[in-house]
């Protein structure tokens, strides 16, 4: 088993513990990516055009013998309408609301993806490749004392993160906020913010004190999924576990 440090509130190593066996799962980026895409496909909102779009016209065909195409034309004028092959006509095969976007994944395969993404949080090379910034001296995943769950103020959380050597990743996220490319700018999602730390805790106190930090997500051990551990389907997120949360995770099947 791999031994990792448990850090106290002043950033010093309090003790060393063994990681649960779940962190020995082989790294499978293909399964992780597949699981992420399945989750996202099941979140898609159905969309489609109006079934009557492009058909609300009084039209008639002029018939044969006039030396012109027999497409439907407006009764008030000569402009073609209704047919998919003409300018201003309806669409031939528009998107429909009843289309089923959902995908399925085997339970064992989905479990392997989650466990593999968890194991990737302990791989320094994978975490660095994802772009996270942290002190090279610390062990991954980052395990902190349970006193971390009792912090009620954001400035105290920042102090602990600085002492451990991982606050630079929160700054990377804050400085990386940028205007989205595309029409999402006009649809209430103008900015994109890079993901930074994932905090896994058993209590809600730390959720309130850490929620305002850029790119930080907070989850309980039983809530962990691919979206937490591998945003965008890319594993290796810089993750903080409290000691009690790690104990609960070790007992999970």
Image (cartoon, helix red, strand yellow):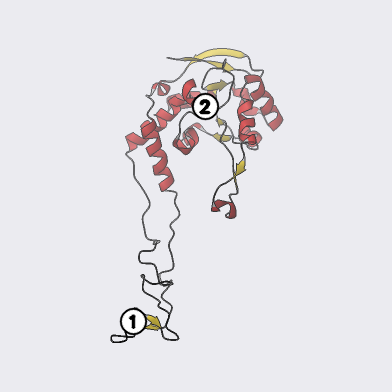
Q: Earlier in the sequence, mark 1 or mark 2?
A: 1
Residue 117: which disc? none
Q: Residues within 10 Å of mark 2 (few under 14, many from 20)?
A: many
**From the viewer's perspective, is 108 left or right of 250?**
left
Which residue is pictured at 42% across the width and 71% down the height? 87
Q: Residue placed at 53% from the left, 29% from the top?
A: 131
- Above or below, 20 against 216 in this view is above
Single out the residue that lies furthest toward the left. Answer: 64
Question: Residue 27 at x, y = what percent?
Answer: 39, 26
Q: For the residues carrying marks 1 and 2, which lies nearer the camera in this image? A: 1
* 202 or 225: nearer the viewer: 225
Residue 111, can we see it? Answer: no
Tag 1, which secondary structure? Answer: loop
| Quadrant housing the C terminus | top left
Which labelled disc corresponds to residue 245? 2
- Identify which residue, 82 or 230, lies in the foreground: 82
The x and y percentages for residue 241 are 54, 25
The image quadrant that residue 112 belongs to is top left
Q: Nearer the viewer, residue 252 or 160?
A: 160
How far apart are the alpha carbons under marks 1 and 2? 76 Å
Q: Position of residue 104 (x, y in %)?
A: 34, 44
1 and 2 marks in contact (CB < 8 Å)? no
Tell me what residue is drawn at x 40 percent, y 42 percent.
37
Which quadrant of the structure image shows residue 77? Answer: bottom left
The residue at which mark 1 appears reads as 68
- Does residue 60 appear in the picture of this structure? yes
**Of 221 and 64, which appears nearest the observer?**
64
Q: Position of residue 114 (x, y in %)?
A: 41, 32
Q: Residues within 10 Å of mark 1 (few under 14, many from 20)?
A: few
């Amino acid at each position: 088993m791999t031994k990792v440090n448990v850090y106290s509130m002043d950033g010093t190593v309090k003790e060393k513990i063994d990681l649960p066996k779940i962190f020995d799962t082989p790294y499978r980026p293909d399964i992780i990516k597949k699981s992420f895409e399945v989750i996202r496909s099941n979140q898609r909102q159905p969309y489609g055009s109006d079934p009557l779009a492009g058909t609300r016209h009084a039209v008639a065909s002029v018939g044969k013998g006039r030396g012109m195409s027999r497409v439907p034309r407006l009764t008030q004028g000569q402009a073609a309408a209704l047919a998919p092959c003409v300018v201003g006509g309806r669409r031939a095969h528009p998107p429909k609301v009843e289309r089923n976007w959902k995908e399925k994944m085997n339970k064992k395969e989905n479990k392997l993806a989650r466990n593999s993404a968890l194991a990737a949080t302990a791989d320094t090379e994978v975490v660095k490749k994802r772009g996270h910034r942290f002190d090279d001296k610390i062990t991954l995943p980052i395990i902190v004392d349970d006193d971390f769950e009792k912090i009620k103020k954001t400035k105290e959380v920042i102090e602990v993160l600085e002492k451990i050597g991982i606050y630079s990743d929160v700054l990377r996220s804050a400085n990386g906020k940028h205007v989205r490319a595309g029409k999402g700018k006009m649809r209430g999602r103008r900015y994109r913010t890079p993901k930074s730390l994932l905090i896994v805790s058993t209590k809600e106190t730390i959720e309130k004190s850490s929620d305002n930090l850029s790119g930080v997500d907070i989850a309980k051990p039983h809530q962990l999924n691919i979206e937490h551990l591998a945003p965008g389907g890319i594993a290796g997120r810089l993750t903080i576990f409290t000691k009690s949360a790690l104990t609960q995770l070790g007992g999970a099947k």
